[in-house]
Amino acid sequence: MRQFLAANWKMHLYPIEALHLTTALHKGWERHGWTLPAVLFPPAIYLRELVALLSNSRLQVGAQNGYPGEFGAFTGEVSMAQLAHIGVKWVLIGHSERRQHFGETGPLLRRKLQDAQQRGLSVIYCVGETLAQREAGQTFDVLQVQLEEVLSDGAIAWDRFVLAYEPVWAIGTGVHATPQQAQEVHAFLRAQLARLGAPAEGICVVYGGSLKPSAALELFSQPDVDGGLVGGASLEASSFLQIAQALLQARS
């Protein structure tokens, strides 16, 4: 069954807060006996500690960013090889904030994805349109380009790949796509994955963009919405656990 959940903490939390949140989520998963695949994406300075803390947990740990390669004169970066070496299992690639604030574009994202998978990491690849692009009727054109410029050569380990649709106009705004809007886009993305040679029916396509517990059940009840990449609502254990419960209920 296609279901997947991820928590993107972005640049939030002090060390003790990250520790308490991780512990609460681990206990929640264990208490319910959930086998739901879930990944926590903390700030980079907490990665090693969380990998150790969750060594016997169903929860896994991912990095919010990684640089292709092993070593090099790239001040401030952490390589995919270094991430894999400390036990990180996942990496986010193509998040709209990396595209917008740090100028990351297709060629670099392609290198990141390919290098991450070569190092044994699994990838969540993010795509999404801005408000101006949606209002101009360009949503599908933008998403097609974002897929093709990174995934078109077919050298992708699809069994270690999740696609996230994150409408830029919904991130951090409190506004989320309606279930109908999300389903329309997710169905389009799945069709595009199939066109690019992926086993599309087996790939999780998840939604990210102001996802809250109150909207989760209806959203996850859509046939092509397989879970979530959760931002602000993942910073509190209770809300993230509610979203997990909604996903399990919708797919039961």
Image: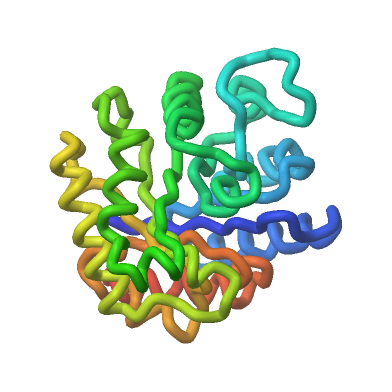
The x and y percentages for residue 227 are 38, 63
Tell me the residue at 67%/67% (across/down).
235
The x and y percentages for residue 219 are 34, 76
Q: Nearer the viewer, residue 191 or 103?
A: 103
The x and y percentages for residue 44 are 72, 41
- Considering every residue shown, the one lying at the far front of the view is 136
Tell me the residue at 39%/76% (across/down).
177
- Considering every residue shown, the one lying at the far bottom of the view is 214
The x and y percentages for residue 121 are 49, 30
In the shown orientation, is residue 134 left or right of residue 210?
left
Q: Nearer the viewer, residue 120 or 135?
A: 135
Q: For the N terminus, give its image quadrant.
A: bottom left
Q: Quadrant of residue 45?
A: top right
Q: Is residue 157 visible?
A: yes
Q: For the C terminus, give its image quadrant.
A: bottom left
In the shown orientation, is residue 211 left or right of residue 20?
left
* Vertical order, 247 against 63 (above or below): below
Q: Quadrant of residue 69?
A: top right
* Vertical order, 228 against 92 (above or below): below
* Vertical order, 169 against 194 (above or below): below
Q: Nearer the viewer, residue 70 or 72?
A: 72
Tell me the residue at 63%/69% (across/down).
232
Image colouring: rainbow
